[in-house]
């Protein structure tokens, strides 16, 4: 496969995953805004901008105005924000057009329909009244594309590059959500590992649609350590770091095709997966959760860059 085609598939699904993750973040902020005080709301909206990784660009444009409507518009439809949902959907469609001959008609149609629908829904600022509807639409269209991929595509290198894009983006997002929201919600480092009666802890789980799953597996109180364990090390949770990196290793192993020497990106991915597999949550907290997650974000970034280099995405 040409590197340009591989890169188009990889980035198409990174952008789709990013758009869904942004919608989930906004939904979490909206949920808190319905119940919280104005001061805490502004703090939460600021944390959402930071989690999305766009705080410097946002502040450069809006200073310290983290009012709900401004944040929502910036993350959903602002053309100056390359990570806004609309920017991501348009970039995903652009990449899909470039690799259209590698996609089934169902995948292309799902992407194109997502672009047309969301473009119409976001042609004007999204109000509080229809925000929930728009966020649901974003998630549903992302799911439709994934469903078309799983239901109609051969399990070959095309499929693997698409899934690599999804899991790289997802691992990065889970690390950022847990890192930033952990320190926004935690009152004091003295509480690390303790049981906290704080309903906002649920927002961390709801950000990755894992609240019900967590409750199924953890009948006791919601604690910081239990949430971190679930989102980092639980291989049953499809957005955990352990799950994402196990899938990345699997996809890269297929793409490696037994090549000798082993591709550098596969070696790198295997090392990350091995480090996660050999940890327990107590050792993570002993190291420092922030330090662990900062390292995880950096590892994922280096791995993404290595994948691009090894497969010559822009060659």
Image (cartoon, rainbow, N blue to C red):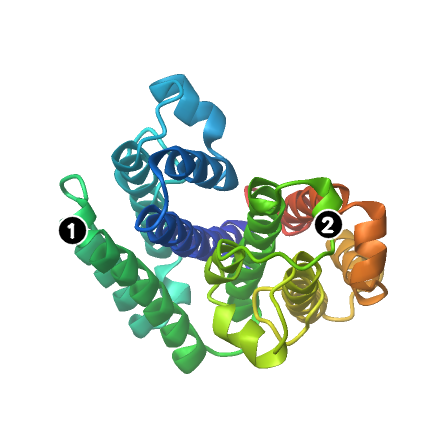
Q: Is residue 249 visible?
A: yes
Write the residue at 18% across / 57% down: 117
Q: Quadrant of the C terminus?
A: top right
Q: Is residue 262 visible?
A: no
Which callout, 2 or 1, points at the residue further toward the start of the chain?
Answer: 1
Secondary structure of the residue carrying numbered label 2: loop
In the rendered image, the vertical position of residue 61 relative to residue 281, given as above or below? above
In the rendered image, the vertical position of residue 4 relative to residue 195, given as above or below? above
Secondary structure of the residue carrying numbered label 1: helix
For marks 2 and 1, give the one nearer the viewer. Answer: 2
Write the residue at 71% across / 59% down: 225
Quarter of the image where one finds residue 314: top right
Disc 2: which residue = 192
The percent coordinates of residue 231 (x first, y second) are: 63, 62
The Cα atoms of the two marked residues, 2 and 1, are separated by 38 Å
Q: Nearer the viewer, residue 305 or 61?
A: 61
Q: Nearer the viewer, residue 151 or 314?
A: 151
Circle 1 crowding by C-alpha within 10 Å: few under 14, some 14–19, many from 20: few
Residue 129 badge: 1
Residue 137 badge: none
Quarter of the image where one finds residue 142: bottom left
Circle 2 crowding by C-alpha within 10 Å: few under 14, some 14–19, many from 20: some
Q: Nearer the viewer, residue 14 or 239?
A: 239
Write the residue at 40% across / 81% down: 151
Q: Most extreme residue toward the front, as rendered? A: 197
The percent coordinates of residue 261 (x first, y second) are: 85, 59
Residue 214 located left or right of residue 18: right
């Amino acid at each position: 496969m040409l590197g340009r085609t591989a890169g188009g598939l990889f980035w198409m699904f990174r952008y789709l995953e990013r758009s869904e993750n942004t919608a989930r973040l906004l939904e979490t902020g909206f949920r808190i805004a319905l119940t919280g005080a104005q001061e805490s709301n502004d703090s939460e909206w600021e944390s959402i901008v930071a989690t999305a990784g766009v705080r410097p660009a946002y502040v450069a444009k809006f200073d310290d105005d983290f009012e709900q409507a401004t944040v929502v518009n910036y993350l959903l439809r602002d053309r100056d924000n390359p990570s806004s949902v609309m920017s991501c959907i348009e970039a995903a469609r652009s990449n899909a057009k470039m690799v259209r001959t590698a996609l089934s008609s169902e995948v292309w149609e799902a992407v194109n329909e997502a672009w047309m629908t969301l473009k119409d829904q976001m042609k004007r600022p999204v109000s509080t009244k229809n925000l929930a509807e728009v966020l649901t639409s974003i998630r549903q269209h992302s799911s439709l594309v994934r469903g078309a991929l799983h239901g109609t595509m051969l399990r070959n290198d095309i499929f693997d590059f698409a899934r690599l894009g999804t899991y790289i983006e997802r691992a990065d997002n889970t690390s950022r959500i847990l890192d930033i929201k952990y320190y926004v919600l935690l009152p004091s480092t003295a509480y690390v590992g303790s049981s906290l009666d704080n309903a906002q802890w649920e927002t961390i789980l709801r950000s990755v649609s894992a609240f019900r799953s967590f409750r199924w597996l953890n009948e006791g109180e919601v604690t910081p350590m239990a949430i971190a364990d679930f989102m980092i090390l639980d291989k049953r949770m499809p957005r955990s770091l352990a799950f994402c990196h196990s899938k990345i290793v699997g996809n890269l192993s297929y793409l490696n095709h037994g090549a000798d020497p082993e591709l550098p990106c596969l070696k790198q991915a295997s090392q990350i997966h091995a480090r996660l597999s050999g940890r327990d949550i107590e050792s993570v907290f002993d190291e420092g959760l922030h330090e662990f997650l900062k390292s995880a974000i950096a590892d994922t970034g280096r791995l993404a860059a290595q994948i691009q280099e090894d497969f010559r995405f822009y060659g």
